[in-house]
Image (spheres, grey):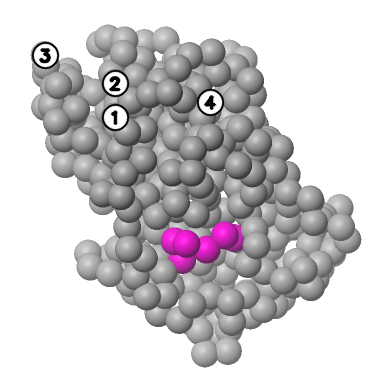
């Protein structure tokens, strides 16, 4: 099937580390309430480095350097890319705050004691940024976008077709955010080429799996109906969109709530020995979401699989039955914990 890229809401994805926007996977950040946060508004006509449709799957294409191959990027620990010595040159670092598999933040202070928020996102889906990249950082093409008086996004291109990159987001109201962003980006590129930032996947981890390649064609055809288009986003999310139905598969790392209470409206579902949690939504675009915990670590950290079946209201089908069938077909392909 053809591999296309997914259009997502502008700014929301890249700003998750600075804001508490719903649905951006910022669970890990939610556990760190002392850090200052502010909502950054997009400039008119501006797109952030994580948006707009690209030209293909994150699982194909040739990286600009073998060190940035997609399978290697999935194993990169983003917090290890925030080099302590580099951060100290900019001010006083705080502790690193992980945000899922691919994001890490440091809500630090500059040398004058002003707020300086730095976030790294590995494996961003890119489109126009590839063509607009008019700068060089550490030997890679790079692109900068500025939200005046609030933030700068510095993206280095690690793969051109389809577009993939690493973005450094700097929230800085008291200075030029692009200057520290470039400094961090140069450090990130050098570190990402080494072995010291690689993680060893735990038994049963989702981190190495390509969500676009995992489901069978038959499972996708049943869930998304006729000739669905494929929309990968980042390194761990994929959607299949048909004419009147779609299904999304998302692998998440981060916060797992106590007693697995992801949503107050969830109901328990047995997927043949695996306990999942189901939530229905009856909006103008009705959906049914299934989540189950793949791994649990310490301090409510873990890994979660999410399957979502959706379609326009006029399309009459049992979304929860579709989500369950897709999940059951997927389970044998997910490694056991």
In which quadrant of the rendered view does residue 309 lie? Answer: bottom right
Is residue 335 shown above or below 39? below
Disc 4 to disc 3, how far (Cα)?
28 Å
Q: Closest to the observer: 42 or 208? A: 208
Q: Residue 48 — which label?
A: 4
Q: Circles 4 and 2: CB distance less than 8 Å?
A: no
Label 4 vs label 2, nearer the camera? 2
Label 3 vs label 1, nearer the camera? 1
Kindly identify the residue that appears in the image at 79 percent across and 62 percent down.
224
Badge 4 crowding class, 10 Å Cα cut-off, few under 14, some 14 to 19, many 20 or more, is many
Disc 4 to disc 2, how far (Cα)?
20 Å
Q: Read off the magenta span.
A: 206-211
Q: Residue 183 — which label?
A: 2
The quadrant the N terminus occupies is bottom right
Is residue 210 shown above or below 24? below
What secondary structure is the magenta-colored segment mainly?
A: loop
Q: Circles 1 and 4: CB distance less than 8 Å?
A: no
Residue hosting label 3? 112
Disc 1 secondary structure class: helix
Disc 1 to disc 4, how far (Cα)?
22 Å
Q: Earlier in the sequence, mark 4 or mark 3?
A: 4
Disc 1 to disc 2, how far (Cα)?
6 Å
Residue hosting label 1? 187
């Amino acid at each position: 099937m053809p591999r296309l890229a997914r259009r997502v809401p502008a700014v929301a994805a890249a700003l998750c580390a600075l804001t508490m926007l719903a649905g951006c996977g910022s669970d890990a950040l939610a556990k760190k309430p002392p850090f200052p946060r502010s909502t950054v508004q997009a400039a008119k006509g501006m797109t952030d480095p994580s948006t707009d449709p690209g030209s293909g799957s994150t699982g194909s294409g040739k990286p600009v350097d073998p060190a940035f191959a997609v399978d290697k990027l999935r194993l990169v620990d983003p917090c290890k890319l925030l080099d302590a010595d580099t951060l100290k040159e900019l001010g006083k670092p705080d502790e690193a705050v992980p945000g899922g598999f691919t994001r890490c933040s440091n809500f630090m202070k500059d040398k004058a004691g002003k707020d300086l928020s730095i976030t790294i996102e590995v494996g961003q889906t890119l489109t126009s940024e590839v063509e607009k990249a008019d700068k060089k950082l550490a030997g890679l093409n790079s692109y900068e976008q500025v939200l005046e008086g609030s933030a700068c996004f510095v993206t280095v291109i690690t793969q051109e077709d389809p577009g993939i990159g690493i973005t450094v987001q700097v929230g800085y109201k008291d200075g030029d955010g692009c200057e520290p962003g470039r400094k961090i980006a140069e450090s990130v590129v050098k570190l990402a080429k080494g072995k010291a930032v690689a993680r060893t996947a735990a038994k049963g981890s989702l981190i190495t799996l390509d969500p676009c390649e995992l489901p069978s064609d038959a499972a996708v055809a049943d869930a998304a109906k006729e000739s669905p288009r494929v929309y990968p986003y980042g390194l761990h999310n994929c959607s299949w969109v048909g004419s009147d139905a779609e299904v999304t598969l998302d692998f998440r790392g981060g916060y797992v709530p106590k007693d697995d209470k992801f949503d107050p409206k969830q109901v328990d579902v047995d997927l043949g020995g695996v306990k999942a949690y189901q939530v229905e939504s009856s909006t103008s675009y009705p959906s049914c979401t299934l989540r189950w915990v793949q791994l649990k670590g310490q301090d409510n950290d873990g890994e979660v699989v999410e399957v979502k079946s959706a379609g326009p209201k006029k399309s009459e089908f049992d979304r929860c039955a579709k989500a369950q069938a897709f999940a059951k077909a997927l389970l044998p392909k997910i490694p056991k914990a």
